[in-house]
């Protein structure tokens, strides 16, 4: 089973959304390899568009001022908040659901 197939399986069976570090831990990857998971998630999102499942993302938010990063062009964890310039940013969290569950 490929890494992307395992990610789909993990996120489909998850009860609550997972961040990239939790996904990496479930895959047995180190924190330095977790960056590649963002690329896999982008590919998974495109692949799932044709089927009956969808990848949902809870966007990252600034823990200092509460700003929510709703308009991300790429799946990633932002480094700074545009409002307060704080660096205490929560990671985006992901889960896969069936379209009829939404």
Image (tube, rainbow, N blue to C red):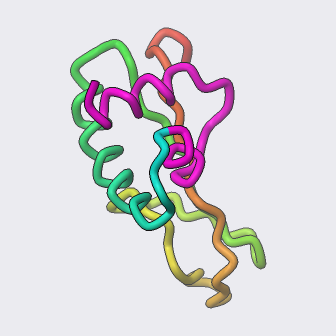
* The image quarter in which residue 18 lies: top right
Relative height, residue 90 to residue 14 (above, below)? below
* The image quarter in which residue 49 lies: top left
Does 54 sit left or right of 77 as displayed?
Answer: left
Residue sitting at the far right: 64
Relative height, residue 95 to residue 23 (above, below)? above
Where is residue 100? Give x, y as percent: 48, 9
Q: Pick whichever, 83 or 34, lies toward us.
A: 34
Asked whether residue 10 is drawn in magenta, I would say yes
How many numbered marks are there?
0
Residue sitting at the far top: 100
Asked whether residue 63 is drawn in magenta, I would say no
- Is residue 58 at least partly visible in the picture? no
Q: Pick whichever, 5 or 99, lies toward us.
A: 5
Residue depicted at 76% across the width and 77% down the height: 65
* Screen quadrant of the N terminus: top left
Where is residue 91? Give x, y as percent: 59, 60
Residue depicted at 67% across the width and 86% down the height: 86
Where is residue 46? Give x, y as percent: 24, 36
Relative height, residue 81 to residue 13 (above, below)? below
Does 15 sit left or right of 7 as displayed?
Answer: right
* Screen quadrant of the C terminus: top right
Q: Pick whichever, 73 or 35, lies toward us.
A: 35
Relative height, residue 27 to residue 102 (above, below)? below
Secondary structure that dominates the magenta span: helix
Residue depicted at 65% across the width and 64% down the height: 90
- Is residue 5 at least partly visible in the picture? yes
Does 49 sit left or right of 76 as displayed?
Answer: left
Where is residue 74? Give x, y as percent: 33, 60
Q: Which residues are magenta?
A: 1-26
Residue depicted at 49% across the width and 48% down the height: 24
């Amino acid at each position: 089973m490929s890494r992307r197939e395992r990610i789909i399986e993990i996120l489909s069976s998850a009860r609550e959304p997972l961040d990239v570090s939790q996904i990496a831990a479930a895959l047995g990857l180190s924190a330095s390899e977790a960056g590649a998971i963002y690329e896999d998630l982008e590919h998974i999102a495109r692949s799932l568009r044709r089927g009956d499942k969808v990848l949902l993302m809870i966007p990252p938010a600034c823990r200092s001022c509460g700003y929510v990063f709703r308009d991300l062009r790429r799946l990633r964890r932002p480094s700074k908040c545009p409002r307060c310039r704080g660096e205490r940013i929560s990671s985006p969290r992901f889960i896969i659901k069936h379209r009829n569950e939404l």
